[in-house]
Image: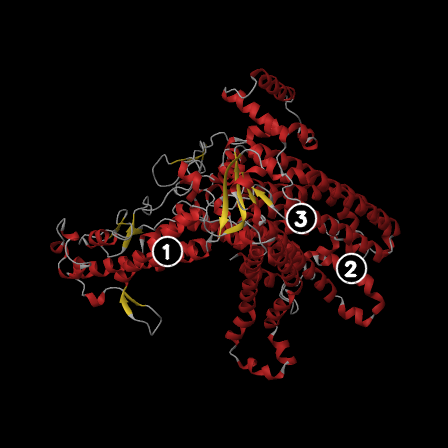
Amino acid sequence: MEAFAHAVVKRAIDPNADKNVGSARGTSTKAFVSTLVVNLVIFGVFALVFLVLRRSNRRIYAPRTYVSVVEKWRRLRAVDGDRDGYADEVEGVSGFSGIVSWVQSVWKIPDETILRTNGLDGYFFLRYLRKAQLICFVGCCLTWPILFPLNATGGNNQDGLDMLSYSNVSDNNKNRLYAHVFVGWIFLGFILFTIYRELIFFTTMRQAYMLSPIYSTRISARTVLVNTIPEQYLNETKLARMFEHVKRIWIATDTTELDDLVEERTKVAMQLEAAEVKLIKLADKERRKVGGESEKVQPGMETEGESGSVAARWLPREKRPTHKLKPLIGEKVDTIDWCRGKLAELNPKIDELQALHRSGEAKKLSSAFIEFETQSAAQAALQTLAHNKPLHMAPRFIGVSPEEVIWTNLKLLWWERLSKFASTTAFVVAMVIFWSIPVAIVGTISNITYLTEKVPFLGFINDVPPVILGVITGLLPAVMLAVLMALVPIILRKMASISGCPSLSAVELRVQNTYFLFQVIQVFLVTTMTSAASSAVPQIIADPTSVTSLLAENLPKASNFYISFMILQGLAISSGSLVQLVGMILYKVLGMLLDNTPRKMWRRWSGLTGLGWGTVFPVYTNMCVIAITYSIIAPLVMGFAVVGLGLLYFAYRYNFLFVYNVNINTNGLVYPRALYQTLTGVYLAEVCLIGLFAIKGAFGPLVLQIIFLVATILFQITLSGAIQPLLEFLPKNLQVEEESLLSLETGTKLGNPSAIHHDSEESAHPIDHDAEPAGAIARYLHPETHESYHHLRKRIPQDWPEIMYTPETERDAYFNPSITDRTPALWIPRDDGGISAQEVAHTSTVQPISDAGAIINAKGSVERYEDAMPPDWQEKPLY
């Protein structure tokens, strides 16, 4: 939906563009107003739809307040005072029942609530949007009062929005460019300091979160994944001797055969479940026709007789569900009888293989999960040089939960990992560079007249009726472009998985880098540069000596397209993410058409919307990069970025609180990557200014800007070197200090009580001194003092669940899911005729099955009780 909106609006904002879809050439004031009006209308319609549907569609717009698959401690605490099905008070904040008052209430919920419900990733995603908005707002305050008057009176006779950009400064007013230099120094310097400050805040907050009981007591916090283990060390005894305080070791095994059997069992079980439901519905329909209530089966009769004898009272055997063992030519069999027999054959085989893998006698792979007694011991093992050969017993990862593991990548040897990484990287780079080719092909469709003139044999297209031709040239390119753009994240995720990433979180981090590269090159640079150059080509051909002046004039004009881009993001995309039209359609329409079993209904009801961090972060990082790049060249862009980022922040804040349930957890590592990627905007702004100053022959501003570029490079090198270890490891001093503070707070004693008292007293001492409130400027300039570890640990949610593992759960934590897979319990609806009762009695001899929680209603349709869960559902342990 978002990709389609981008494609449609890109074409709408520049109707006279050339065949390159999404051209960024200069936008007139009239076109700008048209774009604004169109997006305001879209925003108004979406906002109105949301206001009308919000209260009556709780499952779409507030599932986190009641859907029970969300862990209780992560669910929003909601109170429905008037029992109308919608929360009146959430997290102690009232006003959610009002038509408009809920807007203010969303702002009142503390940010720490998002930290509890969506972890560090959700918390820092919202913080990034807020800080990006702050950067653009400060940029407006710095540049508008100084650069707008200088540009507007620059004497280059530009009109419209271009009058406010750098392009309106003529060659006769070169001295004015010193203002651009020094304003750029101040603003870009502010960005550098903000990135430094946010990295300090992030590392401190992350340390406080990961050392708190909400995280440190999880098994993943003290488990290290070790890859590329030499064969001679694939032994629990040898691995335990290499590290200290080892508690348990899981060596990965080759489960290829077991995976296939488990997959086949699941497929057959779901086939049997669907056939059982179909049989019950068909027989119940016939029962109602011939006898209704008088034809009910008496209690106890369902277990008597042959399989399906109760259903046979109303449904002939030839009408029972059947299927062919092979498409078209295979033998036709009774689906229920065949599936029962197949499951009876598969279950013993799977049990036997699972026992083999549990015993450690199966073929071992080159990776192992090592659980340590404490988080501190796991951190020490993570930093240990484990082997004398390069790339052996490495890389190592900590904090990987079992649900995120990509088990097929645990078998890779060091040379396989290197070759896959190199080949996928080469593919991604080539794709990013040459993606303009399919986009250009799509673009030719929009200019069908030009195409038929150049390729005569396509002239028959002109004979197509005007209405159809209008659809082909107008809507089809937008749809095709949307499909192309939607394919990019899918391809990048597949490449990241193939490259050898051991977990889904590692995949997201790699995709974040590659998708940001795609965004900057294809969405920003290619669009901008080709447009600026193409708009100047006719004049360059007429007068080649004018190339430098024409490019200097047209490059700033390309910024006008991105004003429309910011309007699109702020109005259409933000309101679209609130109204969730696609989610509504999928839930309502597809649910009605496709969900014909209780399990399918439950899956759609319980399947909350998630986010892929690797593809969400880069979109808005690139938006910030664009605003920074044009901050000095065309400062007006930042004003629209402020509004757009603000609306996006509110939309995402609402969705994180009420809608999203993100299961992939990078422990916040997406945030520092986004901060470093934001520096791309700083570099692009500096390089563009250097080029523009060189074109105008402004030697003084050119030298000053080069000096600042060198300073920026040195700043990043120094900052990265200092911060990187803090992103990878937890500091030992804070681990010891946290233990002391927890001991003091809980009244327990660890080690020497007097030492603990002394350490805790020292730790608390600075808090007493910093207790008096500081001004906003002081807090901003000195995060190490006013947002220290002792301050930020107080923001960590204190109402965490007590994490306890049963011996079985702890034993099976890092086994391949195929090894711990249980026989699926089938779920069918209960009917009045007793058919389901007999099916339960007979099928349960080979497969667990239940008819509780769902019924065949008076209309003959399957109806699931809202609070009913599948019979084999269990709340997942918090790994």
Colouring scheme, one of rainbow, by chain, secondary structure, one colour: secondary structure
> Which residue lies under the disc numbered 2?
553
Q: Nearer the viewer, mark 3 or mark 2?
A: 3
**Residue type at the position of mark 1:** Thr
Q: In this view, does 117 lie to the left or right of 642?
A: left
Q: Which residue is drawn at 20% across and 55% down?
A: 835
Residue 54 position within the rendered picture, expressed as x and y whole percent measured from the top left:
43, 46
Considering the numbered disc 2 on the image, is that residue within a helix, a strand or a loop? helix
Going from N to C along the chain, the mark reached first, 3 or 2, is 3
**Rendered location of residue 75, percent (x, y):** 43, 38
Q: Which residue lies furthest to the top in this view?
A: 754
Q: What residue is shown at x 64% (from left), y 70% (from top)?
A: 19
**Residue 593, relative to residue 508: is it above or below?**
below
Tell whether 102 sits left or right of 450: left
Q: 801 and 740: which one is in front? A: 740
**Distance (Cα) linking label 1 and label 3:** 42 Å
Out of 482 and 761, give the one closest to the viewer: 761
| Marks 1/2: CA–CA distance | 64 Å
Task: Give whichever of discs 1 and 3 has the lower sequence position.
Answer: 1
Badge 2: residue crowd in 10 Å (few <14, some 14–19, many ≥20): many
Does residue 266 appear in the picture of this structure? yes
* Label disc, if present, on residue 266 of the rendered structure: 1
Instruction: Give the percent coordinates (x, y) of residue 503.
Output: 54, 49
In the image, which is nearer the foreground, mark 1 or mark 3?
3
Query: Which kind of residue does numbered mark 2 sit on?
Result: Glu
User: Mark 3 sits on what residue?
Assistant: 390
Contact? badges 1 and 2 (CB < 8 Å): no
